[in-house]
Image: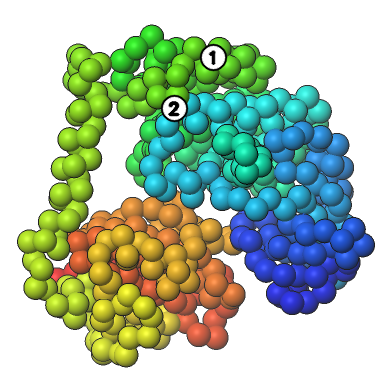
């Protein structure tokens, strides 16, 4: 069994959980022998029972231990305890890039500096034959180098799903590993990960940090087709430097891997652009019709758009200031459910009900908060649902563990997670500033409860 917080695990003391993923749980731990904190990745027992995987894991861990790079999370040790394989890694106290981007895209100077360091990390990895396979914002950690240093210091992490190039060519695979939003076209056709596919993911990452959005959006099938056939996205060109970034994006996101640059060439090009570009000179605005905008109008247009959006969001509450919290909960309640008010215990919650769901799932709890921002914050805190994703399995529609949803005029953000042994879906209703939390059936541990929770959400309807 996986270790619990407070327990001893071999020569480690388990101090907390950092995150969960498809390959196991990452803990904050203390290594007694070396007297240092570590990030301890513990794989599920079934991996240790597979002799082919055990051998692959040992070879992979050895390859990662050879990876000496200032911008890669270091692997200290690996082994097996109580039937579970583990990796002990450098503990980095800092947010991942996806959390940083929740407040909006980075200014171009900072974005280029971050991607520059990611490329440096990949260069060190590729030099010893290690391919990352899952470069994305969530796998980039940021930590200030020192209090007197105002530039981010970047670490590329989660090489736990990496393979050395040799292992990837010679071993069987059970499916594509990676994240569809960042995945190169050839990988979506079943080809093995290569240095060129990592370069493509860097192109997606560069677009994300500059715009706050993935280069291609939609359902998973739509994104797959877009990676394969859609035009390469471009920024609005307001000056020659922005044009240089567009040229770089075209090369990074080339459909044919043979047309992509090496990581060395990418690093050199980014540094040329950074040397030429003052921090705010790149106009990080996705291109789109109309394309004849004058450069001087870009900032004003963006400001006006942001103002309109802010007014639209606020209008829900400013135009209806007298809507009681209980009524907002009622309007967010799916049709056909019997619900009863319950006492409010969480700070910031104005009204709350619990609904009977029919026995295949646990309770559905719906809470009204002060506004949309409070509802989103509650999704992470009071709802106990930091969207790290399911250990195995996915949200409805085979999409990632955090996504937008809409139905019958209601819309918001959906996350799914595993808390202990229970599947949890939680979603916001933006118009009414509510959060709904649906748990799996008590006594039915994940993943057996997943389908019922998934089906319940898929069947939601609103009067």
- Residue 380 in the image: state x and y as whole percent: 44, 65
- Examine the rendered structure and indicate whether residue 206 appears above or below residue 450: above
The circle drawn on residue 275 is: 1
- Examine the rendered structure and indicate whether residue 197 appears above or below residue 24: above
- Examine the rendered structure and indicate whether residue 239 appears above or below residue 223: above
- Residue 253 in the image: state x and y as whole percent: 49, 22
Rendered image coloring scheme: rainbow
Left or right side of 236 for 40: right
Residue with the mark numbered 2? 108
Q: Say which residue appears at 52% left-offset and 18% top-offset.
A: 274
Q: Secondary structure at mark 2?
A: helix
- Residue 156 in the image: state x and y as whole percent: 65, 39
Left or right side of 162 for 116: left
Q: Secondary structure at mark 1?
A: helix
Regarding residue 353, the answer to whether it shows in the image is: yes
Regarding residue 190, the answer to whether it shows in the image is: no
| Image quadrant where one finds the N terminus | bottom right
Q: Say which residue appears at 27% left-offset and 61% top-offset.
A: 372
Left or right side of 155 for 243: left
Q: Earlier in the sequence, mark 2 or mark 1?
A: 2
Mark 2 → mark 1, Cα distance in angstroms: 13 Å
- Residue 133 in the image: state x and y as whole percent: 64, 37
Q: Residue furthest right?
A: 33
Q: Residue furthest top?
A: 240
Q: Say which residue appears at 73% left-offset and 43% top-offset.
A: 73
> Which class describes the residues within 10 Å of circle 2: few (<14), some (14-19), or many (20+)?
many
Q: Nearer the viewer, residue 399 or 296?
A: 296
Examine the image and state in which quarter residue 341 appears: bottom left
| Image quadrant where one finds the C terminus | bottom left
Q: Nearer the viewer, residue 173 or 143?
A: 143
Q: Say which residue appears at 44% left-offset and 76% top-offset.
A: 439
């Amino acid at each position: 069994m996986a270790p619990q917080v407070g327990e001893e695990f071999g020569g480690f003391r388990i101090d907390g959980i950092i995150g969960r993923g498809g390959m196991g749980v990452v803990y904050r731990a203390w290594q007694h022998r070396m007297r240092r904190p570590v990030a301890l990745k513990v794989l599920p027992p079934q991996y240790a029972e597979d002799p082919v995987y055990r051998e692959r894991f040992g070879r992979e861990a050895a390859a990662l231990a050879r990876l000496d790079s200032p911008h890669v999370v270091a692997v200290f040790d690996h082994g097996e305890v109580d039937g579970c394989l583990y990796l002990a890694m450098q503990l980095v106290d800092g947010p991942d890039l996806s959390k940083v981007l929740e407040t909006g895209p980075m200014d171009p100077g900072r974005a280029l500096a971050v991607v520059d360091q990611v490329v440096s990390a990949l260069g060190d990895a590729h030099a010893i034959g290690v391919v990352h396979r899952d470069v994305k914002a969530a796998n980039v950690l940021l930590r200030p180098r020192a209090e007197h240093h105002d530039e981010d210091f970047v670490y590329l992490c989660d090489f736990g799903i990496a393979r050395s190039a040799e292992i990837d060519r010679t071993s069987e695979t059970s499916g594509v590993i990676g994240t569809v939003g960042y995945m190169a076209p050839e990988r979506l056709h079943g080809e093995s990960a290569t240095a060129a596919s990592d370069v493509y993911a860097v192109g997606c990452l560069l677009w994300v940090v500059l715009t706050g959005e993935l280069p291609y959006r939609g359902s998973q099938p739509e994104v797959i087709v877009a990676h394969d056939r859609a035009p390469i996205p471009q920024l609005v060109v307001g000056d020659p430097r922005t044009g240089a970034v567009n040229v770089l994006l075209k090369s990074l996101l080339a459909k044919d891997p043979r047309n992509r640059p090496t990581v060395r060439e990418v690093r050199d090009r980014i540094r040329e652009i950074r040397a030429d570009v003052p921090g705010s000179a790149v106009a990080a605005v996705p291109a789109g019709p109309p394309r004849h905008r004058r450069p001087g109008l870009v900032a004003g247009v963006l400001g006006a758009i942001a103002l309109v959006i802010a007014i639209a969001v606020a209008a829900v509450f400013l135009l209806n200031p007298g809507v009681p919290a209980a009524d907002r909960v009622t309007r967010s309640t799916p049709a056909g459910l019997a619900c009863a008010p319950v006492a409010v215990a969480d700070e910031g919650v104005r009204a709350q009900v619990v609904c009977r769901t029919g026995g295949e799932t646990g309770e559905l709890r719906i809470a009204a908060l002060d506004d949309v921002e409070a509802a989103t914050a509650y999704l992470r805190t009071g709802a106990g649902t930091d969207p790290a994703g399911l250990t195995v399995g996915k949200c409805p529609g085979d999409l990632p563990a955090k996504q937008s949803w809409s139905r019958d005029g209601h819309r918001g953000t959906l996350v799914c997670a595993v808390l202990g042994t229970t599947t949890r879906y939680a979603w916001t209703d933006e118009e009414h500033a509510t959060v709904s939390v649906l748990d799996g059936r008590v006594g039915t541990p994940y993943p057996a409860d997943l389908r019922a929770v998934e089906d319940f959400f898929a069947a939601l309807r609103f009067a």
